[in-house]
Structure formats: C-alpha cells, structure tokens
Amino acid sequence: MAIIKQFILSFLSTIGFAILFSIPRDSIIKSGLVGASGWVTLYISSIYFESNIAGTFFAAIIVGILGELLARHYKKPATVYSIPGIVPLVPGAGMYYTMLALVEKDFHNAANKGTETFFIAAAISIGIIISTSLSRSIKRVKHKG
C-alpha cells in the first residue's frame, strides 16, 4: 500500500513540474509516469541497498532509460521526459538541512548532510549520463549494422 501511495504522490508532483516547465500536453502524463517510476525505484532500492545514494543512482538510470525510450517512440527530445522525471529525486530537503546546520553553526552535521546531498546529486547526474550514453551506443550500433 505504501508503494502505491508513493507512486501516486510522485506522479502528481512530476505532473506539476511538467506543467510548470511547459511540457507539451500530450507528454505530461508520460513524464509523470517516468517520474513516478523513478521515485518508486528510489523507494524500493533505498530499502534494499540501505543507501539513499545507491537508490538515487538506480532511479536516475530508470528515469534516463524511460526518457530515452519514450523520446524515441514519440519523436520528442528526451529532456521532455527526463527533466520532470528527475525532479522527485532532487535532494531538496538535504540542501535545506545542510544550510540550516550551517546557519546554526553545527558544522559537523552540515558536513555530513552536505556530503550526502552532494553524492545524491552526483548519483543523479551519473545515472542520467550512463542511460544517455547507453542509448546513443545502441543507436550507433543499429546504424552501423
């Protein structure tokens, strides 16, 4: 039941950002599904691997792959699906708590939370890069063969 709730809420938040980013109307629901799939992947893999960083990495790969597949199928840029799809993964709370700890002069907690937030952001970017590179490599192999 918790996974269904997570899926629905992340779907709605992704749709909200898709509308905010002026995504074409026919792609809003699809980008919502990409974001919700990424969030559920984060939720499940964070529990399995006991690490938010690893969970975010796998979720970003899923968002990137789904974004590339939908982009190819519907003949739109991959960013139409990937950008709203990664929004639920962005560590906004981690950034907030890092800044709060700095303002409160709790430098040890700020360093811990800041480092975790940095690694989560790096996991998002590396996951998207890997999925995009994989997609381009597959395209290149198909065109040669």
Image (cartoon, rainbow, N blue to C red):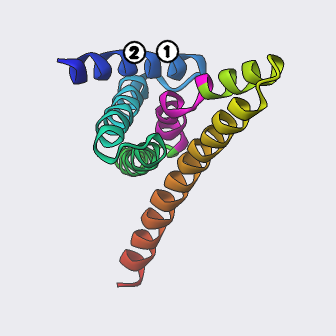
Image coordinates of residue 89 in percent, x first then y, are 50, 33
Q: CA distance from mark 2 to mark 1?
A: 6 Å
Q: Quadrant of residue 121?
A: top right
- Residue at 46%, 37% (x, y): give it: 81
- Residue at 36%, 30% (x, y): give it: 30
Along the line of sight, which residue is nearer the eye, 100 or 59? 100
The C terminus is located in which quarter?
bottom left
Along the line of sight, which residue is nearer the eye, 121 or 50? 50
- Residue at 42%, 51% (x, y): give it: 61
Label 2 with label 1: CB-CB less than 8 Å: yes
Image coordinates of residue 75 in percent, x first then y, are 43, 46
Q: Is residue 89 above or below residue 14?
A: below
Image coordinates of residue 76 in percent, x first then y, are 48, 43
Query: What amino acid type is highlighted by mark number 1?
Result: Gly
Q: Is residue 20 above or below residue 113?
A: above
Q: Which range is magenta?
A: 79-93
Query: Tag 1's secondary structure?
Result: helix
Badge number at residue 16 = 1
Q: Total marks drawn?
A: 2
Q: Is residue 68 left or right of residue 86?
A: left
Say few, some or many: other residues with alpha carbon within 10 Å of mark 2 (under 14 / 14 to 19 / 20 or more). Answer: some
Badge number at residue 12 = 2
